[in-house]
Image (cartoon, rainbow, N blue to C red):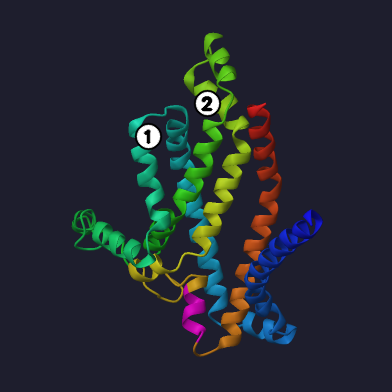
Amino acid sequence: MARRRNRWWWGGLGFSAGLLLLFMVLPVASLFLTLGADALWAGVKHPAVAPALWLSLKTTLVSLAVIVVLGTPLAWLLGRHPGRWSRWVETLVRLPAVLPPAVAGVALLLAFGRRGLLGSWLADMGLTVAFSSAAVVLSQVFVAAPFFLQSATAAFRNLDGDQLTVARTLGASPARVFFEIALPMARPGLIVGAAMGWARALGEFGATLMFAGNLSGETQTMTLAIYTTFESDLRAAQAMSVILVVVAFGILYLLSAPAEQLARAAHESRD
């Protein structure tokens, strides 16, 4: 009787897990299985692909640099100085990750648009942010920064505090402790956060469409190009979708090694 119950238990688990796995894999597999090599190549040669791909690479690399340079100090403060204020700040910086894209786009317009809080001041100085390449970068930073900050904050929070304390007692300055001890120790978490942030920036759509527009060669990223070409050339939209899927899969695969290092470090810290 017990053996039969175990078989039903494991069978139920396997069926439930397999059903969800099939649902998640089937749409992605359909992108590849319904597109031949010739159709893929023809789609890649669509005139909208190259400019959109170049703009996506350029803007996401800029946004990633901004996120890492400005986000690492913030993650350090949040991770190593816990308290009520840090919980509030951590909640605020995670908020863009769960906001609907339309809300993010409206928020960016009201902040940096011509009549926004900062946009009107910038307009008086002759600087227009909305519906420009700068707006693409700002949209990507806004929605992607939480992914880096969450991973980086956790990495700094899980550091061995004894090593940092010993370094300080031996005369190391706070800056030296940060750059020579904390950063190398937290490297796996920073890499994971940076990669996830870059992937999120690459896939950004809604906020960019509302705040930056959909101007070919200037603000039209890969996701916007897919949206634009979907009705007129499904093959091109599918080819660009395949490119993004391959990039995303590559990022996730490369993240497996740093993620394993983080898991081992967390396990060792508990022991």
Q: Nearer the viewer, residue 122 or 162?
A: 162
Quadrant of the image occupied by residue 47: bottom right
Q: Amino acid at mark 2?
A: Phe
User: In what element is the residue under mark 1?
Assistant: helix
Find residue 86 and name its label.
1
Q: Is residue 229 magenta?
A: yes
Up the image or down, 68 lies above or below 217; here it is: above
What crowding class fits label 2: few (fewer than 14 Cα within 10 Å), some (14-19), or many (20 or more)?
some
Query: Residue placed at 41% from the left, 48% from the top?
Result: 94
Q: Is residue 232 visible?
A: yes
Amino acid on which disc 1 is placed: Ser
Q: Quadrant of residue 23?
A: bottom right
Residue ID for mark 2 = 178
- Give the magenta-colored segment's residue range: 224-230
- Indicate the position of residue 28 as horizontal and vertical percent values: 64, 73
Q: Residue at x 66, y 66 (%)?
A: 16
Tag shown at residue 112 = none
**Given this view, does label 2 or label 1 mark the residue nearer the observer?**
1
